[in-house]
Image: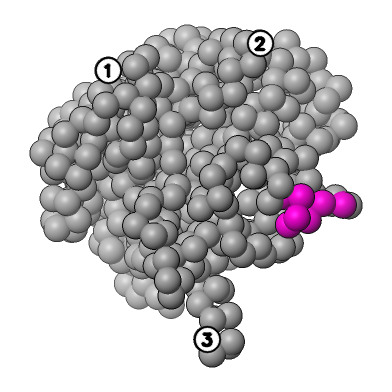
């Protein structure tokens, strides 16, 4: 079944309900968005000759037209390739070229930057005369997609090289959307999702569940996070949810405007995309009540591998269960998660191995990357590349990316274990740990730390803090105090850049 059915059903059942709002104002009702998506689908077929299976790239910031373009693609049987608009034009052009996009929807400035890199590819700017001409086309009939047909090419963040397009089918994303309703909240038309993060990634993926139930997708007028604006939105509406990475949650809990909002108007604060530390959960629940949900997923299994629910987080806090707070929860409904050794065999509870996943949300493979597909999906499992351990109750703790494990004196050291403890220090805002070459031990541990403003603490105190909980061989031998950590457009720390900085330092010393 096509994902376009989600909008078609909502347009029929909730025609007058708000589908997309900009601030307090409704932009499109569900009836309007359904009609516009069908017209766009017809326009893409008639004016641009697109046929089912053709790829359409989206290089757009969050805007009112984003969802209607996505659903128009699926209505016509096309494949959407949403891309993070914060990326450089050359990065965006690589993705559009890699998937052979026939059409690119882009904001005006992005289209101008992309055009020289994509000769012969049509650029369409939402709101332009060309876009309005598409909307004037006769509505297309809904293409009867097979559940296995490709729906979304999710380009990985590319922290270790060129991004790969994870091929997500209609079945994958339908399972993801229904999984939200099973494991997070049973939504209805009274709910709303505030898109603080990019709709090209997790926020837009979560939005499919809200469309399915006729709920409101709300865009801040500022285009992103503004504490006073968000506080006003929360004060005005009830049953609001939003997705934020931990870095944004830390800003929110320190924002006086948000600390004054009526907590009961917030339904769920969805966390993910990067490590969430116990102190983040403590601060978030203290500020907003027991409304935090923390999930683990990948582009290869979008938003859906494991999760720890609002209730489980609140219970762990009440019981002082620090270990449970540091977990990413247990397998989502219908998903199978295993921690395995190098041979793909399950390890005993508490032992470390690679996290393997299978279920209806797991991708079909990587676009035009047969070797990478075979390696990642071998033996019927998605090999996530994440190292972790699982207890007897099925709760999972992530330790590190497989490629980032530090091997010192033949012993594996996991950066996440060290980072968890560093983030528990009151003087540390952010920390990242990497390995650096060592002539005797192979690698030693180096820590990059962003101190909190006006913090009097330094490496001596941080080392003492670690000494209370970690063996000496795991503790950093090198400390680097920095003002910020390098991150990619999705907010993940670029550890390759940290290792490169250390390598340059070594060369200078040599």
Q: Which element type, helix, strand or loop, lies under badge 1?
A: loop
Q: How far apart are marks 1 and 3 (CA)?
A: 51 Å
Give 42 or 18, whichever is nearer the viewer: 18
**Neighbour tally class for label 2: few under 14, some 14-19, many 20 plus, Cα within 10 Å:** few
Q: Mark on residue 334? A: 1
To which residue does mark 3 refer?
507
- Any magenta on residue 366? no
- Numbered range of the magenta stretch: 456-462
Q: Distance between the residues labelled 3 and 2?
A: 50 Å
Q: Quadrant of the C terminus?
A: bottom right
**Comes first in the chain, label 2 or label 1:** 2
Q: Percent x, y for residue 377? A: 17, 43
Horizontal relation, residue 68 to residue 29: left or right: left
Q: Mark on residue 318? A: 2
Give 417 or 274, whichever is nearer the viewer: 417
Give 255 or 97, whichever is nearer the viewer: 255
In the image, residue 82 sits, relative to residue 297, either above or below, namely below
Q: Are marks 3 and 2 in contact (CB under 8 Å)?
A: no
Q: Percent x, y for residue 340? A: 23, 35
Q: In which quarter of the image is the N terminus?
A: top left
Q: Which element type, helix, strand or loop, lies under badge 2?
A: helix
Q: Distance between the residues labelled 2 and 1?
A: 29 Å
């Amino acid at each position: 079944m096509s994902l376009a059915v989600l909008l078609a059903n909502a347009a029929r059942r909730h025609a007058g309900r708000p589908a997309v709002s900009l601030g307090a104002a409704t932009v499109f009702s569900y009836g309007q968005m359904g009609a516009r998506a069908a017209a766009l689908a017809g326009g893409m077929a008639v004016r641009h000759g697109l046929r089912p299976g053709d790829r359409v790239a989206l290089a757009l910031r969050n805007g009112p037209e984003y969802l209607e373009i996505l659903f128009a693609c699926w209505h016509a049987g096309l494949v959407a390739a949403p891309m993070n608009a914060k990326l450089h034009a050359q990065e965006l052009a690589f993705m559009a070229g890699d998937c052979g996009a026939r059409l690119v929807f882009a904001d005006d400035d992005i289209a101008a930057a992309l055009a020289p890199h994509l000769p012969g590819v049509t650029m369409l700017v939402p709101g332009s005369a060309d876009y309005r001409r598409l909307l004037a086309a006769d509505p297309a009939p809904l293409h009867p997609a097979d559940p296995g047909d490709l729906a979304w090419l999710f380009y990985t963040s590319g922290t270790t090289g060129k991004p790969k397009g994870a091929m997500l089918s209609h079945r994958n994303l339908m399972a993801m959307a229904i999984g939200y309703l099973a494991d997070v909240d049973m939504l209805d038309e009274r709910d709303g999702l505030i898109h603080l993060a990019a709709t090209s990634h997790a926020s837009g993926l979560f939005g499919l569940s809200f469309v399915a139930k006729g709920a409101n997708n709300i865009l801040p007028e500022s285009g992103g996070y503004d504490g006073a604006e968000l506080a006003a939105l929360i004060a005005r509406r009830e049953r609001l949810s939003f997705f934020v990475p931990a870095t944004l949650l830390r800003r929110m809990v320190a924002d006086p405007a948000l600390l004054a909002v009526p907590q009961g108007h917030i339904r769920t604060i969805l966390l993910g995309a990067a490590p969430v530390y116990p102190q983040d959960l403590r601060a978030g629940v203290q500020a907003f009540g027991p409304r935090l949900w923390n999930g683990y997923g990948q582009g290869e299994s979008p938003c859906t591998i494991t999760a720890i629910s609002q209730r489980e987080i609140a219970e762990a806090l009440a019981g002082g269960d620090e270990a449970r707070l540091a977990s990413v929860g247990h397998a989502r409904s219908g998903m199978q998660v295993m921690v395995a050794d190098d041979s793909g065999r399950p390890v005993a509870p508490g032992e470390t191995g690679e996290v393997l996943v299978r279920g209806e949300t797991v991708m079909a493979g990587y676009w035009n990357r047969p070797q990478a597909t075979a390696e990642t999906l071998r033996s019927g499992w998605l090999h996530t590349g994440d190292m972790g351990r699982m207890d007897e109750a099925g709760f999972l703790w992530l330790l590190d990316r497989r490629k980032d494990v530090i091997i010192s004196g033949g012993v594996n050291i996991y950066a996440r274990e060290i980072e968890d403890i560093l983030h528990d220090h009151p003087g540390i805002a952010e920390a990242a740990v990497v390995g650096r070459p060592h002539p005797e031990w192979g690698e030693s541990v180096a820590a990059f730390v962003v101190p909190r403003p006006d913090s009097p603490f330094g490496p001596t105190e941080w080392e003492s803090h670690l000494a209370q909980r970690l063996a000496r061989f795991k503790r950093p031998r090198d400390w680097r105090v920095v003002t910020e950590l390098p991150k990619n457009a999705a907010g993940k720390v670029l550890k390759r850049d940290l290792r490169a900085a250390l390598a340059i330092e070594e060369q200078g010393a040599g």
